[in-house]
Image (tube, rainbow, N blue to C red):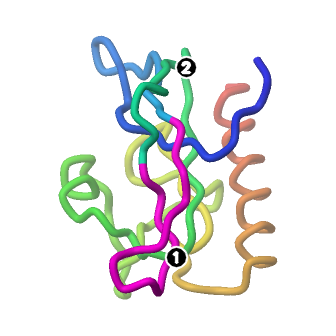
Amino acid sequence: MNPRFSVITKEFLGEKGKLTGLRCAEVEWEKDEQGKNTIPVERLGTEFKVETEMAILAMGFVGPGNKELVSHLGLDLDDRGNIRADDQHMTSVPGLFVAGDMSQGQSLVVRAIAHGNKTANGIISYLEK
Protein backbone atom coordinates (compact mmCIF):
# COMPACT_ATOMS: atom_id res chain seq x y z
CA MET A 1 0.00 0.00 0.00
CA ASN A 2 1.34 3.43 -0.91
CA PRO A 3 1.40 6.07 1.83
CA ARG A 4 -1.50 8.54 1.83
CA PHE A 5 -1.32 12.04 3.22
CA SER A 6 -3.93 14.48 4.53
CA VAL A 7 -6.09 11.69 5.89
CA ILE A 8 -8.26 11.44 9.01
CA THR A 9 -9.38 8.34 10.84
CA LYS A 10 -13.14 8.52 11.22
CA GLU A 11 -13.74 5.23 13.01
CA PHE A 12 -11.94 2.25 14.51
CA LEU A 13 -13.48 -1.00 13.25
CA GLY A 14 -13.43 -4.26 15.15
CA GLU A 15 -14.96 -7.58 16.01
CA LYS A 16 -15.13 -9.26 19.42
CA GLY A 17 -13.03 -6.53 21.04
CA LYS A 18 -10.22 -6.76 18.47
CA LEU A 19 -9.21 -4.02 16.04
CA THR A 20 -9.72 -5.08 12.42
CA GLY A 21 -9.49 -1.84 10.50
CA LEU A 22 -9.93 1.90 10.17
CA ARG A 23 -12.52 3.93 8.29
CA CYS A 24 -10.69 6.94 6.86
CA ALA A 25 -11.21 9.90 4.53
CA GLU A 26 -9.04 12.43 2.76
CA VAL A 27 -9.04 16.01 4.04
CA GLU A 28 -8.26 19.47 2.72
CA TRP A 29 -6.78 22.11 4.98
CA GLU A 30 -8.80 25.31 5.27
CA LYS A 31 -8.81 28.38 7.52
CA ASP A 32 -11.32 28.34 10.37
CA GLU A 33 -14.16 30.89 10.59
CA GLN A 34 -11.90 33.42 12.32
CA GLY A 35 -9.16 32.90 9.72
CA LYS A 36 -6.66 32.15 12.50
CA ASN A 37 -6.14 28.39 12.37
CA THR A 38 -5.89 25.82 9.61
CA ILE A 39 -8.30 22.93 10.16
CA PRO A 40 -8.90 19.63 8.34
CA VAL A 41 -12.13 19.45 6.34
CA GLU A 42 -13.24 16.10 4.98
CA ARG A 43 -13.35 15.76 1.19
CA LEU A 44 -16.70 14.14 0.44
CA GLY A 45 -16.56 10.89 -1.51
CA THR A 46 -12.99 10.03 -0.46
CA GLU A 47 -13.80 7.57 2.34
CA PHE A 48 -11.84 4.29 2.38
CA LYS A 49 -11.03 1.42 4.74
CA VAL A 50 -7.65 0.16 5.90
CA GLU A 51 -7.27 -3.33 7.37
CA THR A 52 -5.12 -3.32 10.50
CA GLU A 53 -4.59 -5.10 13.80
CA MET A 54 -2.83 -2.22 15.56
CA ALA A 55 -3.18 1.55 15.73
CA ILE A 56 -0.65 3.90 17.30
CA LEU A 57 -1.96 7.38 18.06
CA ALA A 58 0.52 10.22 17.59
CA MET A 59 -0.61 13.78 18.20
CA GLY A 60 0.50 17.06 19.66
CA PHE A 61 0.03 17.56 23.36
CA VAL A 62 -3.58 17.36 24.33
CA GLY A 63 -3.11 15.62 27.67
CA PRO A 64 -4.88 12.34 28.27
CA GLY A 65 -7.77 14.18 26.62
CA ASN A 66 -10.85 12.06 26.19
CA LYS A 67 -11.66 11.37 29.83
CA GLU A 68 -14.51 9.08 28.75
CA LEU A 69 -12.10 6.87 26.79
CA VAL A 70 -9.54 6.86 29.61
CA SER A 71 -12.28 5.92 32.07
CA HIS A 72 -13.86 3.34 29.75
CA LEU A 73 -10.49 1.63 29.29
CA GLY A 74 -9.92 1.68 33.06
CA LEU A 75 -6.54 3.41 32.78
CA ASP A 76 -4.79 4.44 35.98
CA LEU A 77 -3.66 8.08 36.18
CA ASP A 78 -0.75 9.58 38.10
CA ASP A 79 -0.95 12.58 40.47
CA ARG A 80 -0.70 15.02 37.54
CA GLY A 81 -3.50 13.37 35.55
CA ASN A 82 -1.23 11.62 33.06
CA ILE A 83 -1.69 7.96 32.16
CA ARG A 84 0.36 5.76 34.50
CA ALA A 85 2.70 3.21 32.88
CA ASP A 86 5.28 0.68 34.02
CA ASP A 87 8.98 0.62 33.07
CA GLN A 88 8.06 -1.01 29.73
CA HIS A 89 5.52 1.81 29.13
CA MET A 90 2.54 -0.54 29.45
CA THR A 91 -0.56 0.98 31.06
CA SER A 92 -2.68 -0.64 33.75
CA VAL A 93 -4.40 -2.50 30.87
CA PRO A 94 -2.25 -5.45 29.74
CA GLY A 95 -1.12 -4.99 26.13
CA LEU A 96 -2.01 -1.28 26.00
CA PHE A 97 1.03 1.01 25.88
CA VAL A 98 1.48 4.77 26.20
CA ALA A 99 4.27 7.19 25.32
CA GLY A 100 5.24 10.83 25.30
CA ASP A 101 2.91 13.56 26.53
CA MET A 102 0.16 11.12 27.48
CA SER A 103 2.31 9.63 30.24
CA GLN A 104 4.89 12.33 30.94
CA GLY A 105 3.02 15.55 30.28
CA GLN A 106 3.97 18.24 27.82
CA SER A 107 7.65 18.17 26.88
CA LEU A 108 10.13 18.68 24.08
CA VAL A 109 9.51 16.76 20.86
CA VAL A 110 12.94 15.09 21.08
CA ARG A 111 12.02 13.75 24.51
CA ALA A 112 8.70 12.45 23.17
CA ILE A 113 10.51 10.73 20.28
CA ALA A 114 12.96 9.07 22.68
CA HIS A 115 10.05 8.01 24.90
CA GLY A 116 8.26 6.61 21.84
CA ASN A 117 11.34 4.56 20.95
CA LYS A 118 11.49 3.12 24.48
CA THR A 119 7.77 2.34 24.29
CA ALA A 120 8.28 0.54 20.98
CA ASN A 121 10.92 -1.59 22.68
CA GLY A 122 8.44 -2.33 25.48
CA ILE A 123 5.85 -3.39 22.91
CA ILE A 124 8.37 -5.68 21.20
CA SER A 125 9.28 -7.29 24.54
CA TYR A 126 5.59 -7.82 25.32
CA LEU A 127 4.89 -9.39 21.90
CA GLU A 128 7.91 -11.70 22.13
CA LYS A 129 6.64 -13.30 25.36
- The span shown in magenta is 26-41
x, y percentage for residue 89? 60, 57
Q: Describe the element under mark 1 as helix, strand or loop.
A: loop
Q: Nearer the viewer, residue 3 or 36?
A: 36
Name the residue: 19% across, 48% down.
72
In the rendered structure, the answer to whether residue 28 lies left or right of residue 94 reads right
In the rendered structure, the answer to whether residue 6 lies left or right of residue 14 reads right
Quadrant location, the C terminus = top right
Q: Nearer the viewer, residue 59 or 28?
A: 28
Near mark 2 (Cα within 10 A), the count class, few <14, some 14-19 or many ≥20, is some
x, y percentage for residue 13? 36, 22
Q: Describe the element under mark 2 as helix, strand or loop.
A: strand
x, y percentage for residue 30? 50, 64
Name the residue: 33% across, 69% down.
65
Report the residue marked by disc 1: 61
- Tell me which amino acid carries mark 1: Phe
- The quarter of the displayed image where residue 20 is located: top left
x, y percentage for residue 10? 37, 37
Query: Pointers 2 and 1 in contact (CB under 8 A)?
Result: no
Residue 49 position (above or below residue 121): above
Name the residue: 71% across, 72% down.
112
Residue 5 position (above or below residue 115): above
Residue 50, which numbered label? 2
Near mark 1 (Cα within 10 A), the count class, few <14, some 14-19 or many ≥20, is some
* Secondary structure mainly formed by the magenta segment: strand
- Tell me which amino acid carries mark 2: Val
Frontmost of labels 2 and 1 is 2
